[in-house]
Amino acid sequence: MAVTASADQQKLLLDLQAFDTKLIQLAHKRAGLPEIVAAQDLEVELGAIKMRLVAAQTEASDLKLNQLKAESDVEQVVARAKRDQDRLDSGAVSAAKELESLQHEIGTLAKRQIELEDIELEIMQAYENAQQAVAELTASEIETAEKLATVAQSRDELFTDIDFEVDSVTQQRNEIAKDLPADLISLYDKIRADQGGVGAALIHRGSCQGCHITIDAQELDQIRKLPAEAIARCDQCRRILVRTAESGL
Ligand SMILES: [Zn+2]
């Protein structure tokens, strides 16, 4: 059976359409908030900083161990040279060959000490650099986390505002929908799903406000002859055409 509705009910369909269009705009606005992308970007940035921080912390702690090892290497050489020197100074060694061997070892140990101290210095420098990197990345982590918190907060506030408006508009559209015939709503919803969210349109000065195509004279004449309760449809876009005083019929 063909769907029918009174002229007033058909006009209400236009009010319903206005609220539904508003809901689409709100959904679009919510999904397109720049704060969403900004927060995602900051999350990615923060994740990268955290990974670099862990790497820098690992490097610093490895270098600290290397530094302790280098210090101990130097201490061992120094202690051994001191032992040799003490022995030499004590006068306990008198054999020429043994004296010569002892002096030679002291010389070798002195060279070795310089080499080991150079290595120790290099490691200390690298350790300081790694500590500096840890400090910088820690500061960067805090700064980025704060930025993210600020952006996420404004995003969530905007979500709350939009959701509030969506609730209000939904209530208003449901208030209208509940008084309209169920089969009219079903038809309207089906067309809306197929036609980018617009199910009903006004005929304004002889053209469909859904697809903005001028309705030809013959079709306009047919619409004019329809009973008030009949549902007119656009030949071009199949939307429900609502007739009012402004329709130019
Ligand atoms: Zn149309």
Image (cartoon, rainbow, N blue to C red):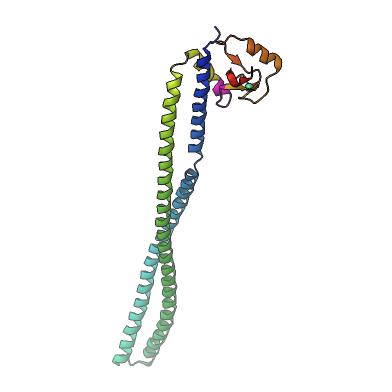
* Residue 161: image location, x then y, percent: 42, 38
Quarter of the figure with the C terminus: top right
Residue that protrudes farthest toward the front in the picture: 245
Q: Quadrant of ligand 1?
A: top right
Q: Is residue 75 magenta?
A: no
Q: Is residue 108 left or right of residue 80?
A: right
* Residue 152: image location, x then y, percent: 42, 46
Q: Is residue 103 left or right of residue 8?
A: left
Q: Quadrant of residue 110?
A: bottom left
| Closer to us: 85 or 3 | 3
* Residue 223: image location, x then y, percent: 63, 13
* Residue 51: image location, x then y, percent: 44, 54
Q: Quadrant of residue 194?
A: top right
| Closer to us: 180 or 54 | 180
Q: Is residue 203 left or right of residue 139?
A: right
For the question of whether residue 63 can be seen, the reply is: yes
Residue bounds of the magenta highlight: 191-200
Residue at horizontal 51%, vertical 33%? 25
Instruction: Say if 33 sits above or below 80 in the image.
Output: above
